[in-house]
Amino acid sequence: MFKQQIIGTINLSLPTIILFQVYPNFIFSWFGITVISLATGLYIFFVNWQSSWKMVNSFLYKPTGDYAEKLEKMITECNMRSEAITINYAYAHETISMATFNNMVIDPIVWSIVEYDPEALKVKDIYEKAIEPQLSSLQKTRLQLIKQALTPGAQRFIFKHELAHIYYHYSYKRLILAGFIGACASAIALYAAQEMFNLFNGIAAIITGILMGMTVDLFLTYTSNILFKAQQEKKADLFAARYSTREDIQAAADFFEKHQAIIETNKDPNNKLSFLPSIIATGHPDGKTRARYLSV
């Protein structure tokens, strides 16, 4: 994530740098800063929106037969229309499941309640032939431990948790937030560059603008993980708890605790940000915290 944001900041800076060479007075006017910041935010929103739909449209395998009926039943149990939601099977890179717009992905590599669906078996076949050989031993270990800890009760709870993200339109809120952060970072970077341009020269202004934009973007992103994403995750947990049995809630609480232990004892040494708490790094509350408020 850190590396991607650095590259993204530099790429977004290039058009502004080119425009600065042609029309510096526009770049540093209040009107220019406003236009460029808004354009940056809209561009980030559109690019993320486009890539999200591209990902959604790439999924090929969906639940069939009794498996589809059981999943659709859980949707109706949450007072939602099953026909308005698309469920897909795909390898989810240790995230277990995910929801984007009105689409949900279930990972049959770790979900036992669907692993024998003929369509899920196709995903498992692709995984075993094309994906698993490329995974590190540490990744394989984590996946195996996650599968062992992910009981049917926990799976049902997590399914309803993802339904909550669809119900609360989380994907759209996340896209808007990303655009807003991009616009803020762009505006602050341009104001900082203006000050440096007045004091020194164009090269100093460019370097300052890029560094300031990257710093503000990272700061606001990690802050939003705490203030926005973590709250959305808790909101989704409470939604799932509202429509789950006491047994499934406890199963989920037990899983979150075990999942936290799996992460802490199997950290990737190549991940330089693995020391960060999950609430900062990804916006997910600590597994022990989730277990605690679900067990109340």
Image (tube, grey):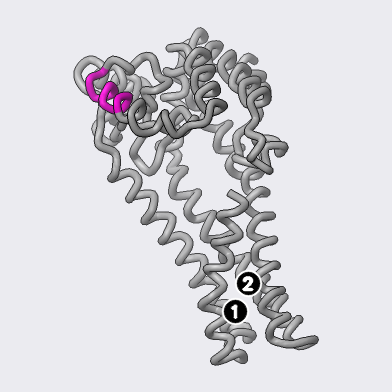
Which quadrant would the C terminus be assigned to in this image?
top right
Q: Position of residue 84 (x, y in %)?
A: 27, 36
In this picture, residue 102 sits left or right of residue 122: right
Residue wearing tag 2: 187
Q: Nearer the viewer, residue 79 or 97?
A: 97
Q: Mark 2 or mark 1: which comes first in sequence? A: 1
The residue at 57%/72% (across/down) is: 13
The question of residue 265 being in magenta is answered with no
Q: Is residue 199 visible?
A: yes
Q: Overall secondary structure of the magenta stretch? A: helix
Q: Position of residue 216 (x, y in %)?
A: 68, 61
Q: Residue flagged by tag 2: what amino acid is it? A: Ala
In this picture, residue 287 sits left or right of residue 22: right
In the rendered structure, find residue 292 and report the number of the disc placed on it.
Answer: none
Residue wearing tag 1: 33
The residue at 43%/43% (across/down) is: 169
Query: Judging from the image, what secondary structure is the residue with disc 1 in?
Result: helix
Q: Is residue 263 above or below residue 197?
A: above
The question of residue 123 being in magenta is answered with yes
Give the extent of the magenta segment: 117-125
Query: Judging from the image, what secondary structure is the residue with disc 2 in?
Result: helix
